[in-house]
Image (tube, grey):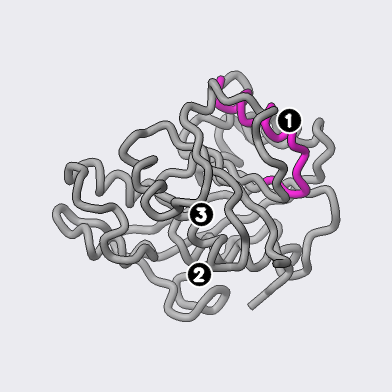
Amino acid sequence: SNALAQVAVQSGIGGIDLGFQRAGWEIAWQVERDPFRSAILARHFPQVRRYGDLLYLCPAVLDPVDCITLDCPTHEYREAHPLWAAAREIVRTLSPALVLVCLPIAVRTRDEGADWRTLTDSLRSLGFAMGDFQVSLELRSDFRWERHFAVGHRAPLPAGLETCLGQRMHLSDGSDGPPGLRYGVVRSGAIAQGEREYGFPVGWTGAEGTLEQRVGAIVDAVPVEAAAWIGRRLKGEAA
């Protein structure tokens, strides 16, 4: 197989993993400390090795990969945060060709960009050239999913992603992404609808968890087709 290996640190319920897998990547291993979300990963990625708390993970036991993705939904990317220190050590030890960091949309402007400079300088010190882009999904009239992505790379990026750097990519109408890329808001009790609209097969979160656990897991996820859109471009496939 010519598929590349990819790993998500803080995998959640596998939105990035499933999207990258659909784009032709192999999933080498996963890290998720929440027992409920880890059980979902185990059910859907049974052949993939999983690890628990990132803080206690020894990088020396990990298989080399071509791309590491880091999902930092709040302040984990700050230099003083122990999770960022642990993730950076994994990146330093494994030295992948690519690092993709999913960040809050306001990271470039918060504290006059101080956090952003710290993060990018931290990865540059490991030998990565840095670029960034935004993904904006109009889920419905009352909700928009947005994230900022930092990408560290050691070789020139494929043209399909290079042209996105510094841009905000609007995927909701299919003009810059897969046709029909639309998501809805997860409403109380509408688990199947939420799974479907975030790109997961219905039943992905199972029936064992509480409503709060399942809804939280879905809305915290990176939508699958957004991840697949990025994964294709990282592989050099602009379609």
Specify the principal SS of the magenta part.
helix
Query: Circle 2: is it few (<14), some (14-19), or many (20+) Cα within 10 Å?
Result: many
Query: Circle 3: is it few (<14), some (14-19), or many (20+) Cα within 10 Å?
Result: many
- Residue 164 x, y percent position in the rendering: 68, 64
Q: Residue beneath label 1, please?
A: 122
Disc with the residue nearer the chain's start (3 vs 1): 3
- SS category of the residue bearing label 2: loop
- Residue 63 x, y percent position in the rendering: 68, 40
- Residue 126 x, y percent position in the rendering: 80, 33
Which residue shows up at 31% across the image and 39% down it? Answer: 36
Magenta stretch encompasses residue 83: yes
Which residue shows up at 52% across the image and 48% down it? Answer: 48
Which quadrant of the rendered structure holds the C terminus? bottom right
Which residue shows up at 58% across the image and 53% down it? Answer: 27
> On residue 171, which mark appears?
2
Disc with the residue nearer the chain's start (3 vs 2): 3
Which residue shows up at 44% across the image and 63% down it? Answer: 137
Q: Is residue 108 visible?
A: yes
Of the two numbered discs 3 and 2 in the rendering, the one whose residue sits closer to the viewer: 3
Of the two numbered discs 3 and 1 in the rendering, the one whose residue sits closer to the viewer: 3
